Amino acid sequence: MKAVIQRVTQASVTISGVKISEIQSGLLLLIGIEDADNQEDIQWLSSKIVNLRIFGDENGVMNRSVKECDGDIIIVSQFTLHAATKKGNRPSYLKASKPEIAIPLYQNFVHQVEKDLGKQVQTGEFGADMKVALLNDGPVTIVIDTKNKT
């Protein structure tokens, strides 16, 4: 799994002109799933994200997690995170899982984050043409790939 983690002061997802999800302070997660991903990747990535110390403490030092800050999370599936760009100018998405594999993994990831965070998270809609709006805070943007845990 690949994740782009963005610390935000606000974020939302709109589909066909209708806002379906919105948060204030917290994290916007863009998640890419490949066939090799499994429950171990889901648990590891969820724990890493929920406990990642990227929010300021009383001294302004990034020393608090989204969980410690009682922040919110929006999770958006994004197959384009697995784009292969070595050949030519048209990206290949062969590593990205097909919906029949990706949807259950995405849903499991959402449930795992909710469990680790201790509250409901917001989501996009898998496969939809989404308009994602965010106000990046910092900016703080971190990329994590479960295939590079060490």
Image (cartoon, helix red, strand yellow):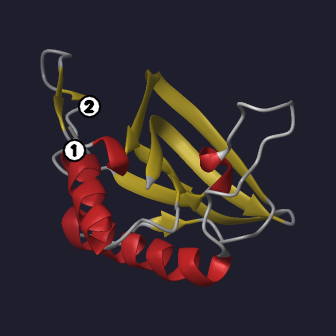
Check the image and report above or below for 52 versus 45: above
| Image quadrant containing the C terminus | top left
Check the image and report above or below for 48 versus 128: above
**Where residue 78 sits: x, y (%)?**
63, 55
Give the secondary structure at mark 2: strand
Residue count near mark 1 (Cα–Cα under 10 Å), binned few <14, some 14–19, many ≥20: few
**Where residue 72 sits: x, y (%)?**
37, 54
Residue count near mark 2 (Cα–Cα under 10 Å), binned few <14, some 14–19, many ≥20: many
Check the image and report above or below for 103 versus 21: below
Q: Amino acid at mark 2?
A: Phe
Q: Report the disc number at residue 69.
A: 1
Does residue 26 appear to the left or right of 46 in the view shown?
right
Q: Report the disc number at residue 139.
A: none
Residue at the spot of label 2: 55
Q: Is residue 42 visible?
A: yes
Q: Earlier in the sequence, mark 1 or mark 2?
A: 2
In 3D space, how far apart are the residues under numbered discs 1 and 2 (Cα atoms)? 8 Å
**Where residue 64 sits: x, y (%)?**
16, 35
Does residue 74 appear to the left or right of 45 in the view shown?
right
Frontmost residue, 126 versus 136? 126
Check the image and report above or below for 29 versus 19: above
Dots 1 and 2: beta carbons under 8 Å?
A: yes
Frontmost residue, 78 versus 150? 150
Q: Amino acid at mark 1?
A: Cys
Question: To which quarter of the image does residue 46 belong?
Answer: bottom left
Which residue: 52% across, 62% down? 34
